[in-house]
Amino acid sequence: MGFAWGPGDILVYETLYKASGASGSGCSFIHEIRKDEDIYSPILRKLFNESHHIFVGLQTIREELPSKSKKPQFVSISKNYRSVIRACMEELQQVAGNTLATQCGNQVSILLAIELIWNLCEVLFIDAAPAGSLLLHLLDWVRLHKADVDERAREVLQSETCYIFKITSALLVFCICFRQMLVKQGTLQPAARSMYKQMDTLLSKMPFYNPGGTQTLTEFDVKWRHWHEEVDRCLQDNSFASNRHLEVICKILLGDEDTLLDHKELLGTWYHFLVTRLLFCHPTVKPTELHYYAQSCMTMFLDSRSVSEPLDNILLAAFEFDIHQVIKECSIALNNWWFVAHLTDLLDHCKLLQSHNLHFGSNLREFLLLEYASGLFTHHSLWQLAVDYFDHCPEFGRVYLELQIERVPLETERKALKVLRICEQRQMSEQVRSICKIMAMRALRNNRLGSALSWSIRAKDAAFATLISERFLQDYCAKGTFSDLDLIDNLGPAMLLSDRLTFLGKYREFHKLYGEKRFREAAKLLLSLMTAKIAPQSFWMTLLTDALPLLEQKEVMFLSLQEEDVEVTKVELLRLALARNLAQAIVKEGTVET
C-alpha cells in the first residue's frame, strides 16, 4: 500500500508486488482517508461556528480582574458551550430518521458523552462546588444525563396509586419500586395503608440542603443524621417486615449497598449509583473525598469480568480531580480536537493548568488549540474560524497561521481578497506577496491584464509590474487602444513601482492631454518621455510617430525648451531635429508615388 500525507487527509493507493519484489500492475483507484470527518457534517459545523464566538468572547475577559468576579463569567461561558452541544445534539436526533441514521446516531452518542464530561468538569473544576452544594450539583448532573429519568418520573406521578413526595433523579429508584409494589398489591388493606403512611412520612421528612437558606451545613448534617437514625429504627424494629417492597425502600433510604446493587438495572451506570449512594449515606461529602467513593462505586457496580469503557476512565479521572488525565483520555477516545481544545482553554483561563507545560515548548492549551485550528484549515469555509484560534496562541500561533494560510486554495478573487485581508491585518508581508503573485500569474494566463497589474501592484512586485506593463504596451501597438483604462488612469503613486509602469501611466496621460486638445502640455510630456530613458526601445518608433502631429502644428509646441539650461537645450534641439528628420523620412518612404 502506498500513501501520501496531506494537511487534513491521506491519499492511499493499492500496489501489487510479485514474490521477487518486482512491481506488478497496480490498482487504478486512489482512496481519500479523512482524519476528521466531523467538520464535513452540516449540523456539527454549527457547533464549530457557535463555539468560535464563545471562544473569542472568553479571550476578552481581562486578566487583572479578581478571581471571584471572573468565576461567574467562567461558569456562564461553560454553560454556553454546553447549550451549543445540546442544541446540535437535538438537531441530530431530529434528522436521525433519514438515511444518515447510523452516522447521526454515532454523533449523538459522542455529543452525549462530551456534554456529560463537560458538565462534570464544570461542577468539579470551574464552579468548584463546596460540600453540601456539591451533592446538589451532582444530582442535577445525573438528572440531565439520565435519559429516562423524566419519563419514569412522569409515569410515577401519573399513577393514581402513587403517593406524592419529593422526587430527584436518585430517588427515582425507590419511586419505581414503590409504584411496582402498589401495582402488585392491588386493593390495599387497611392494615397495609398505615405502613404506606409511615413510609410517606419518612420520605417527607428527608432533609435537603439549601445553600441559599439560613441553615448551616453543620445544622443540616445534624438534622440529616437524626432522620437517618429514625429510618434505621424503623428497619430495626421491623416496621415494614410484613411488606417486602416497603422494606426494600427503607433499605434504599439507608443507602444499603447490597440493596442498591440489586436494583442496578434501574440505576444504569456506576456514576448514577455513586450519586445515589452519596445522597443516602454522605450528603455532605467534600470534593476531596469524591475519589474514594467514585473508585469504590465503580468497582462494586461493574462486573468483575467486564472491562471499563473509556468514558468510565474519563469520569473517574474527573472525580479524582486529575484534570490532565481527563484531557489525555479525551484526546485518545474522542474523534476530534474540538472538545479538549475548548475545555482546556476554559480551564486554563480558570488558572487550573498553569503548572503543566509540554517538553517541546508550547503549553497544553496552545498545543490543543493549534491541533484543532489546523484541522479547521482543511475545510473550505471553516478555515476562517481557525485564524482567531491561531491569533490567541502567543507562542506558535503566527508560525502555524503563516504555514496554513499558504495552503488555502484560492479558487476565486473574492476568496483571495479574504485571505489577503487577513494577511495584511497581521502584517504578513511574505504571504501577501505570495498571494498577489499567484493571482497575478493566474490573471496573466487568462489574458486579464488589468487584474494582473492590480495584483502585481498590491504585491509591490516591480519585475512583474514591468512585465505586465510591457504587455499593455504590446497590446496598444497591436490594437491602437488601451484596455482597462480605469485602472491605468488611476494608478496614482503606484506607477512609481517600476520605470515601465511609470512610462505606461505617463504615456496614457499624454493621450488624455492630446484628446483634450492640450497640445502644449502633451508635447512637453511626450518630450520628457523621450528623454527620460524609461521607454522600451521597441516603443521608440511609436513615440516618434506620436510626435508627428505636434511637430506639424502651426504653433510651436516645444517652447518649454527655452527655459532649460543652454547645454540641455542644445541636446534636446538636436534630438528634436533628428526626430523630425526621421519622421519626415518615414513619411516619405511610406508615400506611394502615383
Image (tube, rainbow, N blue to C red):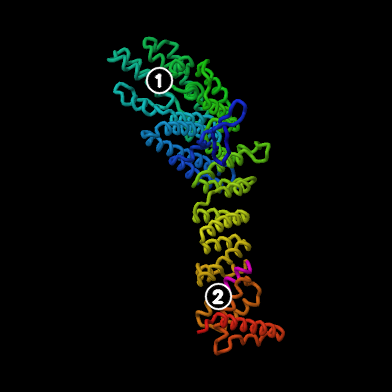
Side of 320 relative to 565 (left or right):
left
The residue singled out by tag 1 in the image is: 174
Q: Residue furthest right?
A: 567
Q: Position of residue 32 (x, y in %)?
A: 51, 37
Q: Position of residue 226 (x, y in %)?
A: 48, 21
Q: What's under tag 1, amino acid-wise?
A: Phe
Q: Which mark is residue 247?
A: none
Q: Position of residue 481 (x, y in %)?
A: 50, 71
Residue at 72 percent of width and 84 percent of height: 567
Q: CA distance from mark 2 to mark 1?
A: 93 Å
Residue at 29 percent of width and 15 percent of height: 186
- Magenta residues (range): 498-507
Q: Is residue 499 magenta?
A: yes
Q: What's under tag 2, amino acid-wise?
A: Glu
Residue at 62 percent of width and 26 percent of height: 20
Residue 509 can be seen, yes or no:
yes
Callout 2 crowding tier (Cα within 10 Å): few <14, some 14–19, many ≥20: some
Tell me the SS state at disc 1: helix
Side of 406 relative to 103 (left or right):
right
Q: Residue furthest left?
A: 187
